[in-house]
Image: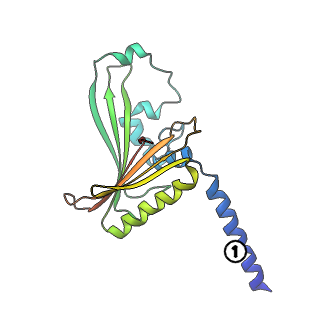
Amino acid sequence: MSVKRILVLFGLFVCIGTVNAQQTNFDTYTNQLFFNIFKPRPDTAIAEFLRRYTPSLYFKHQTGNTTGDALGKKDFSLEIHSFLFTHHPFFQASFTNGKIEFYCQRYPDPIGTKVYDVKLWFTFDTQQEADMAFSKLVETYIPISTKKKISSLSGYQQAEFSEESSQNLFSKIKFRYTSDNLDQHRYKILFETTNDL
């Protein structure tokens, strides 16, 4: 009798886990991959970095919109800020390290630093780890996307996904998986927030 109860409980936990996994949508999962940096409350692992290097992302919910006139001026310098990590709070795959690159324009005060592009990198020591991580990303995005395209081009694999009905920040993403013989970590996945779909 107790074996049957254990099996029923196990089945119930599997069903609950499946329902919870299906509730994550395109925009939510993409934001999670970026440590929720575009949400009012970014993940605590990156919050201090944002406050220090890209305050416009950290304080985004407290400041008003900057006028187009101010941002239209050419008086800015270009910067790249990189946040390095060895653990990801939402992406449960084995990787050596990761990096989020913030491409910024620094304007004179009171405007400050504005982020115009963000790229997410995962690096791997083994091809098996990279294969599994790439597969995990593909498997996650296939059911939550309305358009998808997976291709192999000139030495790398590419997966593009779009969610056409989305009115959210993220409706298109692309990630590329490639080997890199110039770096000590031989395999990389680059995650970007645009594609050609």
Q: Quadrant of the C terminus?
A: top left
Say above or below: 5 vs 144. below
Pick whichever, 31 or 64, lies toward us.
31
Say above or below: 191 vs 125. above
Q: Is residue 76 left or right of residue 24?
A: left
Q: Is residue 61 left or right of residue 114?
A: right
* Residue at x-position 38% and y-position 32%: 115
Pick whichever, 109 or 160, lies toward us.
160
Q: To which quarter of the image does residue 155 belong? A: bottom left
Q: Secondary structure at mark 1?
A: helix
* Residue at x-position 33% and y-position 36%: 103
Circle 1 packing at 10 Å, graded few (<14), some (14-19), many (20+), is: few
* Residue at x-position 55% and y-position 40%: 164
Residue 19: % across, % down: 67, 59
Q: To which quarter of the image does residue 113 belong? A: top left
Pick whichever, 193 or 123, lies toward us.
193
Residue 158: % across, % down: 38, 53
Residue 88: % across, % down: 44, 56
